[in-house]
Image (spheres, rainbow, N blue to C red):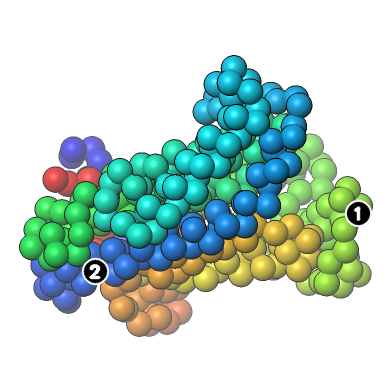
Amino acid sequence: MRGLRRIRRLLAAGVPGREEPLRAQRRAARSAALLVRVFYAANLYLVFRHLRLWGGLREREVLDPLWPVAWVPKVGIPEGVDALMTLLLAGAFAAALLPGWRPARIAAGLGLLGFHALESSFGKINHASHGWVLASLLLIAAPDAGLRELERSRLLRQRLLNAFWSAQAMLLLVYSMSGIWKALAVVTQMWRGEVHGLAPTALALHIAHRLLQTGDESLLGPFFIEHPALGWAPFAATLYLQVVAIQVAFRPSLHRSWGAALIAFHFMVYLTMAVSFHPQVLLMGILVLASPFDPGWGWRRRAADLPLLGAVASRLVGEAPRQAQQAVEGALGSHRLGDR
């Protein structure tokens, strides 16, 4: 436990919040409970979009099943598809109606896992839905309680906040994994003397390769191809946003800013390369952009919390240097992640 606290303090920043801890916990728990409801209502909408695939999946004759649907060939593809789609629909409706009831969330999570595993069992993986599936599985850990029980119990509120933060951290970790992999590629390509991710023409070349590969057209892609120097700053900023994303999970003052920035990144990817990650945009909006942990600080104190750049930013904006040893306890009030 002490080791986890030290890691948390190392990743966290900021100064203690001024809000009384128990009051801060109540406020955050109310917000988190509402966002869980929004999550499952949005999930119901996404499941409705998946209905168009039902008939086509039943007609497939060849299946290379991923492990969650390894049983489908044994019962038959049409029968397996019908069973999975029924679970998907039933779980989605149950969780939307009763988000505080754990069996409903379990059904929703298993339905999503099974459906997306089936969808990805025909030679192509749908990466756009990975975050949504993982979040639905992590939210199963939220307490089996309604709003009245949450109001009465500090422990139940804390369990809800822990589950919600875990989903946030998972989502941001995915971006960090992507960013770190790209950063390692930059180092390797620099060593080899190749064009790398921080080169002035990197974004233009990436856009051109993608559009030639898919045959798609994009609104802004041709502009950046013709003016490659204008793409350097957005590409470098995106690399920074992704690499440090997991550290932002421990700095609640930055949650909403990072949520907005990463959503803007997906908008830019679509406008330049015609790649749509709409489930990820929706998930980022619910979990991070609308984060219940935001302490309500001004932009100067938020700037001082920037990973790697906080010390420089604090001098530029005139904010006192961040105090890492005061950790995330101050930012989250009583939301002591990892504590029981």
Q: In this view, does 106 lie above or below 20?
A: above
**Does 47 sit left or right of 62 as displayed?**
left
Q: Which of marks 2 and 1 is nearer the N terminus?
A: 2
207 and 132: which one is in front? 132
Q: Please identify the quadrant where the C terminus is shown.
A: top left
Q: Mark 1 points at which residue?
A: 215
x and y, in percent, of residue 147 in the image: 19, 64
x and y, in percent, of residue 196 in the image: 76, 49
Distance of label 2 from label 1 (alpha carbons): 47 Å
Outermost residue, left side: 152
* Residue count near mark 1 (Cα–Cα under 10 Å), binned few <14, some 14–19, many ≥20: few
Residue type at mark 2 is Arg
Q: Residue at x 63, y 65 (%)?
A: 265
**Does 148 sit left or right of 223 as displayed?**
left
Q: Which residue is drawn at 88% across and 48% down?
A: 213
Q: Is mark 1 on a helix, strand or loop?
A: loop
243 and 284: which one is in front? 284
x and y, in percent, of residue 297 in the image: 32, 78
